[in-house]
Image (cartoon, rainbow, N blue to C red):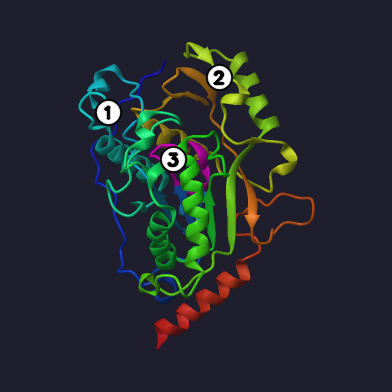
Amino acid sequence: MTAHPPPAAAGRYPQAATAPGADAAHRSDIPARRLLLVHAHPDDESINNGVTMAKYAAEGALVTLVTCTLGEEGEVIPPELAPLASDRDDTLGPYRADELAAAMEVLGVTDHRLLGAPGRYRDSGMMGAPQNERPKSFWQAPLDEAAADLVAVIREVRPQVLVTYDPNGGYGHPDHIQAHRVAMRGAELAARADFRPELGSAYAIGKIYWNCNPRSQVEEGFERLRATGHSFPGIATVDDVPGVVPDSDVTASITGDPAYAAAKAAAMRAHYTQIAVDGPFFALSNDLGQPLFGTEHYLLVHGDSGAAAGEREDDLFAGIGEMVGMEESARIEEAAE
């Protein structure tokens, strides 16, 4: 398997740049288009949304990533870093924070945060593992308590678009399921004026998407992998890929300049303890190769599609351009006063 050097040490997650209540709608330095992504562990964002994040960051949108845990229970791929594991020195979390910071630098994303505060919620391990029952595990977090931490971010950033997992978290991991619940509940509570007004003025997100992978793309990707020389001991299956859905379920597909796919691959390489990348393919700790997708797909579950009937969107902000323009005009007028 192709080896990659570990990332250089980088800064830990920046937290909120403004106090609760200091929202984007009243700051002239915030971009007109704002995208929020909620993920369970470091590396999930690069695997699922690396192209999307690189594209919108390059286009000047504010891309905000909220990661719910540091992935402390992850398996460690490089033998020389094995002591980081939770059953040894239990220092993987801080190392993965540095990996994530390096990945975000590659993608051009400057606003990445841990839910609540660093270390507030711990990786719960795989479903059924003893770690699920730890009091500090994300799986055990009271839903409205964790959602309130996200409400503070939503009301500050005021994103038009939210991206997260489907109700199964893509593949049934407890932290992914909980991230989905927190994202959806956070969006609901953020829009309620009677919920925690000290966290900022109420705000309703215009569009919410769930990550997904159309079956045809996944099957074609494995055909390419089998036909190409690779360095992996084995090959995964379609069932190993999270969020595989019938092609007809997909409502939006994001691609673009090949540089975005290259940035995604580089961001995945930055997660050195978790991912090994070999050209257009990668493997997790199970050493089973799978395709690295240069086009990312979504299911719109809240809001109106900006595409014609029967067609897919090619822009997550499609259909909300008029609203964005109105917000931008208001900011310009306010700044001029």
Q: Quadrant of residue 27?
A: bottom left
| Range of residues picked out in magenta | 39-53
**What crowding class fits label 1: few (fewer than 14 Cα within 10 Å), some (14-19), or many (20 or more)?**
some
User: For mark 3, what is the residue?
Assistant: 175
**What crowding class fits label 2: few (fewer than 14 Cα within 10 Å), some (14-19), or many (20 or more)?**
some
Check residue 36 in the rendering and tell me which mark sits there, or answer none: none
Residue type at the position of mark 2 = Ala
Looking at the image, is mark 1 or mark 2 nearer the viewer? 1
Q: Is residue 170 above or below residue 233?
A: below
Q: Earlier in the sequence, mark 2 or mark 3?
A: 3
Q: 150 left or right of 93? A: right
Residue type at the position of mark 3 = Asp
Q: 139 left or right of 52? A: left
Specify the quadrant that holds the C terminus: bottom left
Q: Residue at x 40, y 70 (%)?
A: 196
Q: Nearer the viewer, residue 187 or 66?
A: 187
Q: Residue at x 38, y 39 (%)?
A: 42
**What crowding class fits label 3: few (fewer than 14 Cα within 10 Å), some (14-19), or many (20 or more)?**
many
Residue 69 is situated, as x and y percent measured from the top left of the image, at 35, 43
Residue type at the position of mark 1 = Ser
Q: Secondary structure at mark 2?
A: loop
